[in-house]
Amino acid sequence: MHQPDTSPRHSIYYDYKVYPFQRPSEMDDKKLRHKAVIVGAGPIGMMTALNLAQHGIPSVVLEADNQVSHGSRAIVFTRRSMEILQQVGVTARMLEKALPWSRGNSFYRGQCVFRMEAPDTPDSRFRPMYNLQQQYLEEYILDQVMHSELIEMRWASKVMAVEQDDNCVHLMVDTPEGEYRLTSDWLVAADGARSFVRSALNQRMEGASYSGQFVIADIRIDLDFPTERRAYFDPEWNPGNTVLMHREPDNIWRIDYQLPQGETPEQALSEASLHQRINAQLKMVGIDAPWELDWCSVYSARTLTLPDYRVGRVVFTGDAAHILPIFGVRGANTGLQDCQNLAWKLALHIKGVAGLDLVDSYSRERVQAAREIIDEAGKSTRFMTPPSKGYRLLRDATLSLSLQKDFVGPLFHWRTSRAHNYPDSSLNTAADNAVFASGPANGMPLENIQLSENDYLFDHLDNAFNLLLFNLTPVQLDQMQTLQATLQTEEIPINLLHVTSRPAEQAEPSVTRLVDISGHMRSAYGAGSGSVYLARPDHHVAARWLSLDVAAVKQAIDNILNKA
C-alpha cells in the first residue's frame, strides 16, 4: 500500500500542512466514470482543474504526495503568468507576498558587464517578474481548488498503471487503504519531469541533455541587495562556471551554482561542500554574515519535448510534456501557458461543442512553442554551461571582451520567458489582420490596457470567447447580442466588451461597457468605429476586423470549433 510520510516537511520559514487521505467512492464498489482526471497536484495540474471548472467541467486530481512541493523550485513568475493566474483569483495573494523586479545584472571579474531592463509601461498591470517560492503559489491555487464544487482532490493517491481504449482511460491507483480502479473519459498528465504516465505509455522526449549540473540552495540571510537577477560568470571560487542569486520572500536567498565536471550530487550536497561554496560566494560579493540552510537540490539542464501532447485520450502538460532549463524562468511559466491553452479546448470538446481537432490544436500550438523555447533556451544554456571545448572557448572570449567593449553586453541576455504567439494557428481567420496599423495581431495575446486608475482590460475578460467591440452603433450592438444569444444556446461562451467614449444611448444587457474617454485603448488596438477583435478563451487573438461583419464573426468562431 502507498504510504507517504505523514510528518510535515521541515522548513525554517514555511509551515507545511499534511492533507489527509479520504477514501474515494470507487473503493466502496461504486461504479463511476469521470469526465476528466488530472495526475499531479503541482501548479499546472491544479490550474488545469480550475480552468476546467470555470467551463463547468468536473475533475478529479490525483497526487501521490500529501503536501505541497518541498523547497523553492519555481520562484520567478512573469507578467503573462500573473495575467493567467488573475483569471483564477490568486493574484491578490501573490501581490501581497511576492517580490516584484524588472532588472538583471551579469558580472564578470567583479564588473557588471550587462544590465537587462525588462519593459514596464503605465499599461502594465503587473511588473515584469515576481519572485515567490513555489510552495506559496501551490498553497494559493489549492485554496481556490478547495472552494470549487467541481474539483475533487485525492491526496496520497499514486497511479500504478494506465490503460486506455477508444472511449476512456483506466487507472490503477494505490492508496494508504489499498488499490482501486478509476475510469475517466480523459486523462491529463501533469505529473512532472519524471512523469509516470509518460513512461507507462512509452512516450519518449526529443531534444538535448547538457552535462552541467547545478546546486540549488535556499538560505536565510540578511542581505542588503535589491530584488533582481544576479549572474556571476567564471568566479574565482568556481572557475569556468556560473552562479545565480535571487532574493525570495521571508529573507530567503536562492543561490544556484554550477558544479565541476564529475562531481556527484551526493558529494555536492554534503554539509561540508555546501558550507564551503556558499561561504565562498558570499565572500565574493562582500558579505560576512551568518546564514541558515533551508533546502537544497541538484538539477541538470535539459531541453526536451514530446513530439505530440495527445496520445489517445491522454493529454500531457507542463513538465510531463516538456523539460526546459531554468535559465530564463521558463519551466512553470511555460506550463501555465500550457494549461490555459488546453483547458478551454478540452472543455468544449467534452461538452460536445467541438471535435478532436480543437484538442489537437493544443498539441500543435504548444509543441511549436516548446520547440521555440528549446531553441532560445539552448543558446542560454550553452552560454551558461558550455557543452564542448569550442563553446567554452567562445564563451570565455566573450567574457574577456565584455570588460572593454560595451557592444558585447547584450550577448549575456538570458532570453527570458515570454508570452508565445500562434500566428500560423489553424484557429486564426485572416480577415483584416494584415491591414491594422497597430494592436495585437492574430495569434498574439490581447494587450492589457489601463482604462482608468486600478481598472484594466484583463479585469473584464471572461473564460469565454471575448469580443472587443469598438464604438458600435445601437443597431450593431443589438446584432451582436443576438449572435451572443444564439451561440450561448449551443453552449458556446461569449463575452461582449463594448469599448466606447460615448454615453450609453440605451441599456446594454449582457454587454460589458469599457469607457475609453481618451481613446488610448482604441489607439493601442488600431481600432476605429465598428472595429472588432475576437479573442479565444485563453486571450489569444483569433481574428480582427476594421468594420463589423456579424456573419464573418460567426464564421470565425465556427472555424475555431471546426464547424466551418
Image (cartoon, rainbow, N blue to C red):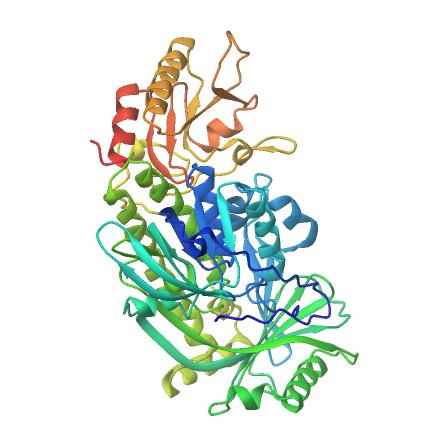
Above or below, 26 against 505 in this view is below
Q: Residue furthest front?
A: 29
Q: In screen coordinates, is 19 left or right of 181?
A: right
Above or below, 500 against 115 in this view is above
Q: Position of residue 75 (x, y in %)?
A: 58, 62
Q: In screen coordinates, is 487 left or right of 131?
A: left
Q: In screen coordinates, is 57 left or right of 459?
A: left
Residue located at (54% from left, 23% from top) = 516
| Residue 69 seen in render | yes
Q: Quadrant of residue 222?
A: bottom right
- Counting labels gives 0
Could you say which is closer to the camera, residue 100 or residue 180? 180
Q: Residue furthest top?
A: 505
Q: In screen coordinates, is 300 left or right of 345?
A: right
Above or below, 446 against 29 in this view is above
Q: Position of residue 251 (x, y in %)?
A: 74, 66
Q: Position of residue 435 (x, y in %)?
A: 31, 32
Residue located at (53% from left, 11% from top) = 504
Q: Position of residue 536 (x, y in %)?
A: 38, 37
